[in-house]
Image (tube, rainbow, N blue to C red):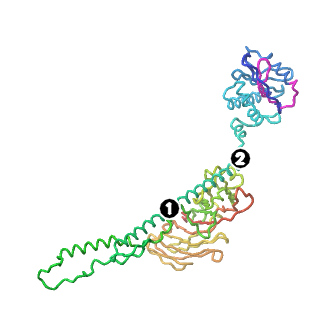
Amino acid sequence: MLYCRLSSLLRSVPEAESVRILLFHPNILLTIRDVAVLSRQFRDMTRTRIEGLLAAFPKLIDASGQHTTVETDNVRYVYQPLDELYMVLITNKQSNILQDIDTLHLFTQVVTSMCKTSDEREIARNAFELLSAFDEIVSLGYRENVNLSQVKNFLEMESHEEKIQDIIAKNKEMEATEERKRRAKQLEMQRREAAKAQRQNRASAYGSSGYSSVPSQTYTPEPTYEAPKPQPSYSKPAVSAPKGKGMQLGKKSKQSNVFEAARQEIAVEQAAPLMATPEPTAQPSYLDEAPARPTDQEPIHTEVTETISAKINHDGGVDSIEIKGDLQLQISAAEMTGLQLQIVGGDREGIQFQQHPNIDKAAFNASHVIIPKAKPFPVNRPLKVLRWRVQSTDESLLPLKVNCWPSGGDVTMEYELTSSDATLSNVVIRIPIPSGDATVADCTGSYDFNGSELSWIIPTIDASASSGSMEFQCADDDADIFPVQVEFELSETVSGVDIGDAELLEQAGVPVPFSKTVRVMAENYNVV
């Protein structure tokens, strides 16, 4: 039995003293002159009793012996050298010596891992940390079933909830910083657009005054934004040419008129953009705008997807059933990233779950709760947080049973809904017809034949129309019309996995609204 509870930290002797002894009661650091460096009792003892035990220990040590235990009439000393010190564990003689030695080794590992050097100065500097570590090893006089790594974890005293709160606070700070940057960028672009519009206005005013056909006689302090209509290059010249063919003084040559027309056309083309009045420019649409979510979708949106595969014998029985599903989470509000989801229906026999690495697996295994482990969920980015899988041969898992009765070219097929609560949509049963010849006599729903495959189409199967049949004739052997492929969709999971409710970690017990989309479909659902 180990000794319990508090002792005092005693002063170490000067360096001039001889070899030091580290004595634990079970943790006491001593010198040859019986001065304890560090002591920890786990039983109520008087100071006189402790000093007596410490005084007796140096006299019992045999320097030439190979033993690490010493006994008196009442107690047993289990010790271990530690550089220039000794680490000593004092117990009664009825205790398990193997357990005492193992406990002493653990104490030694704690000291060497927490102290850089095993001297009095370093041990005194880390005295209170060592005492806390010793209390994790021994409680009420009994050894705890812990190792060195567990002791270190206990001393760190990390809080998962505190980490989540810190992460949420940092996330909010980052969101605020990004918002400030976005607003600054938006204002800068607005200033640039305003400056650009002002330059265009000035250029327009300059063009209207420089290219006007009628010179202005008065000074206007403000430039006008309405430029006179330019003369088109194809207008008739102001002076009409005489009809005579002789030489006329003052008449420009034909080539000069061509050059003049070209010059006027170039002038009009250059002046046209300057005279255009700038229109207000719309704010660019790429300024870090968050994608808009659908109007019927909450800030917390979940999407459950599941596929079912089955291999069914046409004469009865099931060879295999496999269900695969996943849960996808998308959060569009930063204040809701600290979220927990309660999963229901996960107690089915044979179901296997796989969580995202950022999900707390211990919390999910304990109560099927999805909680972020180290950092909150991302914003505006879908994340698959959970996957599950079911493998079975239980016929009750089949949403739809399909039976086939071939008989010498006459084939009767029938289907039956297994659950009255389920609703199947877009049901298609595809039957291979290798001969390319098939005649349908009667069927529930409709059918389509493309020459090699007969498709039996039923839009909806529910409790009001839970069964149906089809009869057809073909020239194929009975084995040639298999495998029959079955396709359908469901609005609820086959495995039973669903989302119970959602809560914020900051407001435990208060449910928050969320939207959900469920999509279940058949994949490799065959009758063989």
Q: Nearer the viewer, residue 302 or 260?
A: 260
Is 20 on the left-hand or right-hand side of 398? right
Q: Main secondary structure of the magenta part?
A: loop
Residue 493 seen: no
Q: Which residue is mark 1?
A: 189
Q: Secondary structure at mark 1?
A: helix
User: In the rendered image, which quarter is residue 113 located in?
Assistant: top right
Amino acid at pointer 1: Met
Q: Residue at x 80, y 30 (%)?
A: 40
Q: Which residue is mark 2?
A: 159
Label 1 CA crowd tier, 10 Å (few <14, some 14–19, many 20+): some
Q: Secondary structure at mark 2?
A: loop
Residue 198 horizontal/vertical position (percent): 45, 66
Residue 145 horizontal/vertical position (percent): 75, 37
Residue 356 horizontal/vertical position (percent): 61, 53
Q: Which residues are magenta?
A: 26-49
User: In the rendered image, which quarter is residue 416 located in?
Assistant: bottom right
The quadrant of the rendering that contains the C terminus is: bottom right
